[in-house]
Amino acid sequence: MNQPKRVTVPTVKSMKRAQRIGMLTAYDYPSAKIVDSAGADIILVGDSLGMVVLGYPDTLSVTMDDMIHHTRAVARGVAHALIVGDMPYMSYHVSIEESVRNAGQFIRAGAQAVKIEGGKAQRIKTVEAILDAEIPVMGHVGLTPQSVNVVGGFKLQGKNADDARRLMDEAIALDQAGCFSIVLECVPSELAALITERVSAPTIGIGAGPTCDGQVLVFHDLLGLYDALAPKFVRKYADTGKEMRAAVEHYLQDVRSGRFPDGNTESFHMSTTEELKKLYGDAVVVPMPKVN
């Protein structure tokens, strides 16, 4: 059977206006295997792991060590999708030199590109420096979760004309700098449509309406594994969390009632009654269990 070709940065760029891009997050080996085998084009090792995996209230506590650890695990489970590492808070804010070094750590860990939030002038310089180091960059404008304290929470961006123009200018600047794709998060669908039309890079929406070149969701949101936040734009495709909880409850009931493990089919036994007698002695009769 022919294996699907590995998705590359040029592959993603060629998909604009030709094929919708399917992107999902993954944070470990089993989730990466599932997402990759299902046929995702891009897997984002998102700093959202801080909330859905590590239990933080936001993404600001996530470190480079966290991200590199999880990127390595994801890379071991992926054979097809393009892996993008999400550069965490303060990994690209201090200096351009440090930003490039941190981006390089993601590539060494198995990612093929990195994602950076924001598109203001200083951020563009950082993007250009990382690109100059031959590391592909995915841009991200709109709601940028690492700026949650500045914008005042997780809420829609670009609602009025001035804010919309600013976000459009940022997206165009990221496109001109050379980003191979741009995430548009939590912006009006009208703005997302306009940006998608005006930039050459594919746009990937999350809460940005249906006209983007692709869409991304968080793995745990899609499967109903995380319920601390319930954004309007999340579609839950399964209630896996409920099913997992029910399975665990069933297991605990069976343990406490003595129904697990079964004494025959789920247990191991001595090879013969004679061996049992050697262990217990002739004074104790231990019948060999019947195996169905």
Image (cartoon, grey):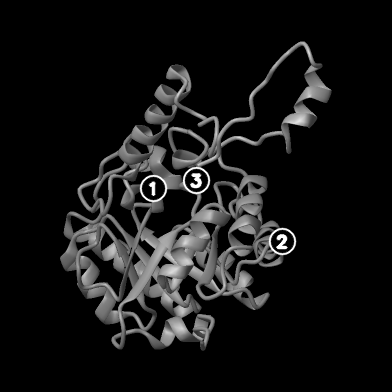
Q: CA distance from mark 2 to mark 1?
A: 30 Å
Q: Is residue 47 visible?
A: yes
Q: Nearer the viewer, mark 3 or mark 2?
A: 3
Type of amino acid under label 2: Arg
Secondary-structure class at tag 1: helix
Q: Is residue 114 above or below residue 21?
A: above
Q: Residue at x 18, y 54 (%)?
A: 159
Residue 242 x, y percent position in the rendering: 31, 37
Mark 3 Cα shell of 10 Å, populated few (<14), some (14-19), many (≥20): many
Q: Nearer the viewer, mark 3 or mark 1?
A: 1
Secondary-structure class at tag 3: helix
Residue 49 shows which numbered tag? 3
Mark 1 Cα shell of 10 Å, populated few (<14), some (14-19), many (≥20): many
* Residue 142 occupies quadrant: bottom left
Q: CA distance from mark 3 to mark 1?
A: 10 Å
Q: Residue at x 68, y 75 (%)?
A: 133
Return the residue at label 2.
101
Residue 265 x, y percent position in the rendering: 53, 39
Q: Residue at x 43, y 25 (%)?
A: 254
Q: Earlier in the sequence, mark 2 or mark 1?
A: 2
Type of amino acid under label 3: Leu
Q: Residue at x 24, y 62 (%)?
A: 208
Q: Is residue 152 visible?
A: no
Compared across the picture, whether 225 is left or right of 1 comes to left
Return the residue at label 1.
220
Residue 276 x, y percent position in the rendering: 76, 26
* Residue 98 occupies quadrant: bottom right
Type of amino acid under label 1: His
Q: Is residue 248 above or below residue 77?
A: above
